[in-house]
Image (tube, helix red, strand yellow):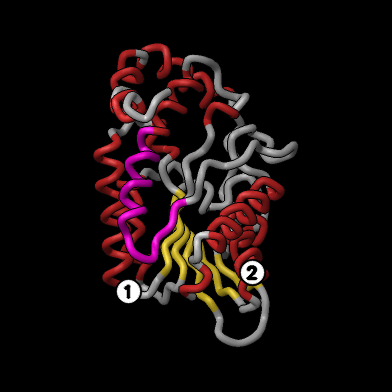
Amino acid sequence: MTETRRPRALRLSRAIAVAQAPVILRQGRRLRRETPRLPDAPAPWEGTSGSGDRPITLLVLGDSTAAGVGVDHADLGLAGRLADALAARTGRPVHWRARGRNGATARDIVRHHLAEALDAPVDVLFLTVGANDALALRSARAFERDVRRILDRTRRAHPAAVVLMSSLPAFFRFRLLPEPLRGTLYRHSQALESAARALVSRTDRAHMSPPPPPYTEGFFASDDFHPSALGYRDWADFAIEDAALGGMMELL
């Protein structure tokens, strides 16, 4: 696909998804019935990784991946694994906490979780959101608006904070998803990601991860949708390595 055609194709993603809605919604309902619903990681969603001076405070904010769905201990979820990777990269202790909700969209985060999440020190915010916005067929404009609100309110509350945003899931690699649901979700998620990436690129002290590499064997939990402990570790290592290459560690 050429660069001149790509923006138009992304803008059409929601229209295509809406046109296929009867089939997609039927497939989605069937998946929800047949897919095991895994619980959140047990509380507390906070801890410390590493030791030493000059601790870094890490806030992981978002959807089911922030909630640690797929593992039986929060240390093994995304927040704990990010803290491990960040501590190893910087040589500093990381005090981490996770906030959010399974199934949350970016709008849900803004309305119900952001104020409380920001009411404590934040050196690094890791934002993991967008999968449910794609599943709900929210528009790229609405998603971008909510991500902007998260970035703006974080900057006002914590001017020196580094913001890292995850790319959206590579839905085309989710073997659980049937067609046309798989392809439609992937195309629409790319439209959302493109809008968010353009916004993050214009924001100081902010960085968005590139699309992930192919998922390794064992990446998924038993529901074939959420990451396993191995998957969260791979994701965290990839995100922190990329952030370091992007110069984000130098800002801490």
Which residue is at the front of the view, 114 or 7? 7
Q: Is residue 206 magenta?
A: yes
Q: Position of residue 59 (x, y in %)?
A: 47, 65
Q: Position of residue 223 (x, y in %)?
A: 63, 33
On residue 127, the disc is none
Identify the residue at horizontal 34%, vertical 73% (top origin): 158
The vertical placement of 215 against 231, above or below, is above
**Residue 224 is drawn in which quadrant?**
top right
Quadrant where the image shows the N terminus? top left
On residue 159, the disc is 1
Q: Position of residue 182 (x, y in %)?
A: 51, 22
Q: Secondary structure at mark 2?
A: helix
On residue 89, the disc is 2
Q: Earlier in the sequence, mark 2 or mark 1?
A: 2
The vertical placement of 208 against 43, above or below, is above
Which residue is at the front of the view, 107 or 3? 3
The vertical placement of 215 against 197, above or below, is above
Mark 2 Cα shell of 10 Å, populated few (<14), some (14-19), many (≥20): some
What type is the residue that disc 2 sits on? Arg
Magenta stretch? Answer: 191-208
Q: Secondary structure at mark 1?
A: loop
State how far apart marks 2 and 1 are (Cα). 23 Å
